[in-house]
Image (cartoon, coloured by chain):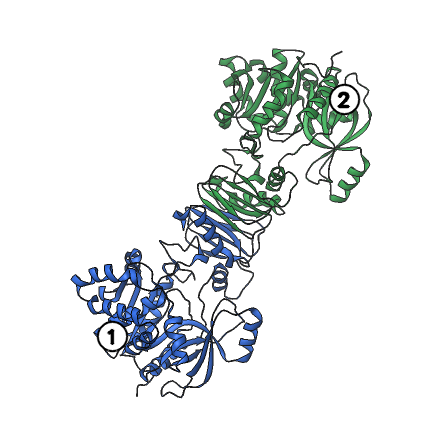
Chain colours: A blue, B green
Amino acid sequence: MHDATASLDDFYAVIPAGGVGSRLWPLSRAEAPKFLHDLTGSGKTLLQSTVDRLAPLAGEGRTMVVTGRAHRSAVESQVEGLSDANIVLEADPRDSTVAIALAAAILKRREPDVIVGSFAADHVINDERGFRRCVGEAVAAARAGHIATIGITPTEPAVGFGYICADGPAEIDGAPSARKVDSFVEKPTLDVAQQYVASGDYLWNAGMFIARADVLIDELRKSEPELTDQIEELAAVWDEPEQRGPAVDRIWPQLKKIAIDYSVAEPAAERGRLVVVPGDFDWDDVGDFSAVAKLHNQGRNDRLAILGDGGTVLADSSAGVVISQSKRIISLVGVKDIVVVDTPDALLVTTTEQAQRVKQVVDAIRRSGNSDVL
Amino acid sequence: MHDATASLDDFYAVIPAGGVGSRLWPLSRAEAPKFLHDLTGSGKTLLQSTVDRLAPLAGEGRTMVVTGRAHRSAVESQVEGLSDANIVLEADPRDSTVAIALAAAILKRREPDVIVGSFAADHVINDERGFRRCVGEAVAAARAGHIATIGITPTEPAVGFGYICADGPAEIDGAPSARKVDSFVEKPTLDVAQQYVASGDYLWNAGMFIARADVLIDELRKSEPELTDQIEELAAVWDEPEQRGPAVDRIWPQLKKIAIDYSVAEPAAERGRLVVVPGDFDWDDVGDFSAVAKLHNQGRNDRLAILGDGGTVLADSSAGVVISQSKRIISLVGVKDIVVVDTPDALLVTTTEQAQRVKQVVDAIRRSGNSDVL
């Protein structure tokens, strides 16, 4: 039996770094998605913070980043010492099942007993100790053959997240707080979310999955046999420089786009293979500019958050956030809870309350034929 | 006796084109003040509209523009056919008395019986017929030896304007609606403004003064003899190319800065020399972005006004105004009554309600050492 606090020498961190983050446009965009930005003012980008958070758990050289070809140089310049073996480049985005299962399949061939844990590149967690404790328990559960997820204890009845309904104790050595998973549920209405939070049995689905690579692939095979074959075929030649390219050209366009929640997590939960470790640490998926403002203001609603080293911001306005990427003077007069994102080719003005709706604007811009700024 | 509707062949229009319009920053600024901009979406700048409005009254070649040296080329490119004789360049701004009285003194030497009418370069009037009728009456009053002003019948208890308190009928041939002036009063509080509007005797002071040039200079001499001498000394050599420069260098720095309201209008009113023609035409001094929005929306409060041929504006926001001078996409999401002014080196975000406070921001920018954007 492993001690959850000891180094996890069979653990490998996988970071799917994809997703544009449309609700963070025009900061986040196809060429420079959310994970490449410092959205917390920490001086590190979300990707860098994710890598640094996982380093003490995975150990040196045991973090793999899965990202789009277009982001290779940005990712390599942000993540020091990332070897070619630890960067998986996607020909085009194929959703989270391909990203995570391909990484698992590649790592399984290199190291048959490896435990993989996947963590999104663009989430924020400050309580790293709490996070490490949970990952330690999740790895212990994975060693015992389970697929483990970490569910975040809700701090409010959020309607923007899916929830995990937890059942009784899983009773796994080294994972004392792990619980069985009853089901995954979609984003609820506010009423339902309030009931979830009150019940104490519902946790936010933060998309963190930890499992033996072979268990993950086996579970995937049960629901998506063809996709699994394709992924294993790719993995078989991934480390053969001359064969990888042709295999990608041939197989990639056929890969099914499906979220890992649907291909693995939900079916595995139904089969009783999933356990959840409740996480009491802070967590935020930085879903919109309202979240950016909140993260910066650390709970103080009377402060304007200013990000970016661009221009000079002169504001008598309280709350909200200004992100400045141009070298201009930005002046705000008497606007409360405002969101101003000033980039060289696009300007967004909204409020923290309306920030969720930015995605609709992005759709409107696409329809208007101005996709070059997206 | 002249017929007020006939051509006014003794009339000369003077347009003082000065004043930065700080409340319209960052659109209006030292290098490109308010009068050089199209703030109504008419396709003409405020200066051009002013010139065009006066052309049917003054006749060809009888409009003089008084402006700063820095604006010479902008003014000449905007006003077609403006001769050197019709542009008076100020070495630096010396307030309205110098601008108007110098023009009057120059014109008096060229044409002793000339009647001058001064009209700010940056006001908006749409009812040109109503305007012409009033100027016709004012010129008739000026011919009779009065100093005439046109006071605007208030449509609301505005606190941003000074008022003219009108007395009984002036009984002047050709100026049937002219009234004696009791006094000029400063910008009132809302309470007082409401009383003014209710009384029917108070008119907005729109800074329009019409008088024989010699009468204007004589009235100025009574209150500002030294300044009058200096202005006449300048006027005496103005049309002598070799003497003008040295005279300006010597005299200009000594010229007193005083508004014509204090140097001529108020003292002349006390001496019973002033009459007012009530103007029922629309009039706006476009004092802030709220006025810009109102002028564009023509009373409809549910519409977002978009000015400038810069970028693409995508907005689901109602009311307010966007002025775009950069080639960027501007996206507004769920912000009401917003004011966004997007220029290459400065961005302003405020609301129509707070637009008056922009002047304070300009002061703050000056203090912050960023005067290059002012």
Q: Position of residue B286 (x, y in %)?
A: 62, 36
Q: Residue at x 50, y 18 (%)?
A: B246
Snapshot quadrant of residue A262: bottom left
Closest to the observer, A27 or B168: A27
Residue type, label 1: Lys
Q: Is residue B7 above or below residue A320?
A: above
Residue B151 lies left or right of residue A181; in this view the side is: right
Closest to the observer, A326 or A149: A149
Q: CA distance from mark 1 to mark 2?
A: 100 Å
Would you call the spot at circle 1 few (<14 residues within 10 Å), some (14-19), or many (20 or more)? many
Q: Is residue A138 above or below residue A26?
A: below
Residue at mark 2: B273
Mark number displayed over residue A108: 1
Snapshot quadrant of residue A238: bottom left
Q: Quadrant where the N terminus of chain B lies?
A: top right
Q: Residue at x 80, y 40 (%)?
A: B195
Q: Position of residue A167 (x, y in %)?
A: 46, 83
**Mark 2 and mark 1 in contact (Cβ < 8 Å)?**
no
